[in-house]
Image (cartoon, rainbow, N blue to C red):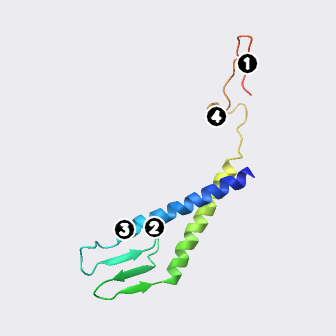
Amino acid sequence: MKKLVIFITVFVSTLIAFAFVGLVASVLMSDSGDEPDGVDRLGFPFVFKEQSGPVALDYFSLNRLIADTVVAVSASAWVGFRCAKRSTMTLPHNSPDSILMPLEQPNTRGHSSPGV
């Protein structure tokens, strides 16, 4: 159950990150609004929509939209699976990364006991 919650959380977070990057890329790739024939572009990593004013450019590619969606969903699923898999890994007791192990807790007699 813990793995599923981690997977869903990371999957949705990564999808939101892809949407945010797509919006930022759309703003950066589009021409400024001050130009009379500026082109608005939408899509990351593949531009699937371009629209312009006076020259009446209106381009839409369903194949590129599907490719953007496939890239975002597959990357999100991969990141989610990796995070869920790594969350269950445990370190051996004598691992050099002992900072990740529980700290030693003093017992009630005044001397410290070894960590778990």
Q: Position of residue 49 (x, y in %)?
A: 43, 80
Cα distance between the residues tagged 1 and 2: 53 Å
Cα distance between the residues tagged 4 and 3: 42 Å
Q: Name the residue under label 3.
A: 27
Q: What residue type is labelled 3?
A: Val
Q: Residue 22's mark?
A: 2
Residue at image position (66%, 52%) is: 6
Cα distance between the residues tagged 2 and 3: 9 Å
Q: Where is residue 81 in the image (x, y as percent from the top left)?
A: 66, 57
Query: In the figure, 28 relative to 95: above or below?
Result: below
| Sequence-first tag of 1 and 2 | 2
Q: Residue 93's mark?
A: none
Which quadrant would residue 5 be assigned to in this image? bottom right
Cα distance between the residues tagged 4 and 1: 18 Å
| Sequence-first tag of 2 and 4 | 2
Q: Judging from the image, what secondary structure is the residue with disc 3 in?
A: helix
Q: What residue type is labelled 1?
A: Ser
Query: In the figure, 76 relative to 112: above or below?
Result: below
Cα distance between the residues tagged 1 and 3: 59 Å
| Sequence-first tag of 2 and 3 | 2
| Label 2 crowd bin: few (<14), some (14–19), many (20+), radius 10 Å | some
| Sequence-first tag of 4 and 3 | 3
Q: Name the residue under label 4.
A: 100
Residue at image position (73%, 16%) is: 107
Q: Judging from the image, what secondary structure is the residue with disc 2 in?
A: helix
Cα distance between the residues tagged 2 and 4: 36 Å
Residue at image position (28%, 87%) is: 54
Q: Where is residue 97 in the image (x, y as percent from the top left)?
A: 63, 34
